[in-house]
Image (tube, helix red, strand yellow):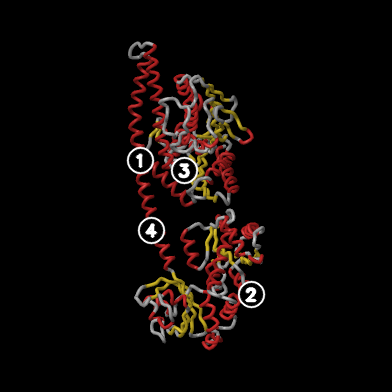
Amino acid sequence: MPDEGSLALRDAAVGAGNEALSLLVVEDDPVYCEMVTAKLAASHPTFDLLFAGNVQEALSILSSRGVDCVLLEHYLPDGVGSELLEHARYQLMLTPVVGYSACTDAHMAVEQYRMGCAAVLTKEEAFEGDNLRGTILDVIERYRARASAERVGSAPELLRRVGKILHRDAAPQNVGIASVNANLRLIHEAAIQTMSEGIVLVQHRSDIVFANPGFKKMLGLFYVEDLPGHPSPTVDLVLSAESLAVFRNPNRKTDRYEARLLSPEGMEIPVRIAEMMIGDDAVLCTVTDLREAKEQERRLCESNEALEEKNRRLAELCDLAQHFLDHVSHEFRAPLTVIREFATILRDGLAGATNDEQRKYLDVVVNRVDDLVLMVNDLLDSSRLEAGLLTVARKPCRLSDIVARISTTLERKAIAENITLDIKVDDGLPTAYCDPEKIGRVLVNLTVNAIKFSDEGGHVHLWAREDAGRSQILCGVTDDGPGIAKEDQGVVFERFRQIEGNTRAGTKGFGLGLNIAKELVELNFGEITVESEPGHGSTFSFTIPTAEPCHVIRRYLDFCTRQPSGSSSVSLLTGALDASIGRQLADAVEGFLQQLLRPTDLMFRVASHKWVLAVRAREDDANRMITRIEKAWTESDRTEPAGKLPQVRLAVGGAWRVHEQYDELVAAFQHALHRAEGAHT
């Protein structure tokens, strides 16, 4: 993009005389038209802006007046930008065109250059800084410099006259070869002074009656006498056999195609030919040299192939590393369990009396084994999260029960590190909707992390309270450790990232704990944040929704919209068991279904034997999911203590596009819940 120094010089060169520069903006979106106006409003030199919403409007403007530059959107209501470049190529002989679009594909940029754009911008680039004005001034300056060097004189007006002659409304049969000959000098003068592209007039699809210098230069020639077959050159001497067949094919559906020129030395030159019929037996051809574009395309393809190969190799190495981590993690678990159990037996005196010093050492062993178990669990969960294989069993539960289950482990860890741990869960908290095991993991990871970063004798506070205004519960862990600098707070949740700080010797982990905590919170439709100031400790807090169906489904849909890939639709399913099925078997069915659902699916239990499911899939994919579940049930042939696992009846109730039908989907979910509750009662 142009820098400030070059822009200053360009302003002086292009804006000499303070004349306004005319810019035709071909854009159908009023918002972008306003953005262009705003960007150029205070520009020097000033711009006289003309707007066209489609190709036909642009052609009408160009046929009635000249402009200094055209800003051309690629996608238009009545065609694409290349059609304007084709139909108005004679009016645009001396007018630079800046192509721009929302597409960032490199192939699109190459195609726009090949169509004749002098510069190409994405819309993001165009409205960044002074890029738009700088690019427009740059191409105008280049075109004016070229015209001056070739002594164009009154060429703009001349070319507009040529355009009117070639695009006039008279029927083709009324424009004979005599009329062409009468205007041949006019065409020859315009082309020879302004165009680097080739201009060739061919009669009877055979005889070359005119070729401009641009065409001769493509062939490596300098004089008209050098054309093959002079003084009567023909197209069969300058086109390859295959291209000649295309040129002479009367059934060809397009007047724009790629071809191959033949130089006198026999070298093939890739070109694009655009034809215009002049009367019944003559055709005017614009020939664009594609050698540079083809070379750029070749290099781009080579770069893409090299990149794809590197990505493939990286994917293989990533899979290999993932399998290795899975294998090592699983293999670690068994010996760690044995070490911990036998150390506990010795510490508790079950294998004989131990003194205080021995029990202290055994406490250290158990504590360090617990650290290793936590790291192994982190590795396994990270692997499953990466592969999308982690099972999430969300259900209504009480946060006090979750905290009670993990409190003994956390207290033992705090005592071993000489840290005071306070646990405060407010009484009367509403029922939460989450996976209790996963939220327990989050609390363990956050608390262990706080203990690790606290000085000996420090304090760690685990707390939970209701955020009634937002139908959620707020949980957190606060410590009085060294704190985290503001610039580091954005990276603490990244995988394998650790902030250097006051960690205890021997407690450095893999840098996965906070990343996994963030992933698990988001899988439970919550958000996690950190508040910290160096020297004043840190607070990591997260939210989980309360078990209100309407609120849960909205949290779930918001979660779906944030996922980078997957279906944009959500299907609703209902599941039911016979009312005679007991609670214990129904619980086993729910656990079986949870194992088969993905983390991006939601299951809400309505009664002891009814469920409403939301799955991220189109309706046909949802039906295939039901088939897969039924097949898994048949193959499992599970028997629970309360009896054989009964089969659940599943049915699809419809599918909705999340972004476009958000409210309709929420209403359909509520309706499905009410129907299930009504059938139950």
Q: Quadrant of residue 127?
A: bottom right
Residue placed most toward the observer, 523 or 96: 96
- Observer-side mark, 2 or 1, equals 2
**Does label 2 or label 3 sit earlier along the sequence?**
2
Mark 1 highlights which residue?
A: 321
Quarter of the image where the C terminus is located? top right
Q: Give the CA distance from mark 4 to mark 2.
A: 45 Å
Mark 4 highlights which residue?
A: 302
Q: Give the CA distance from mark 1 to mark 4.
A: 28 Å
Mark 2 highlights which residue?
A: 64
- Observer-side mark, 2 or 3, equals 2
The amino acid type found where label 2 is placed reads Ser
Where residue 272 appears, as percent x and y from the top left, is 45, 72
**Does label 1 or label 3 sit earlier along the sequence?**
1
Mark 3 highlights which residue?
A: 649
What residue is drawn where x is 41% and y is 33%? 510
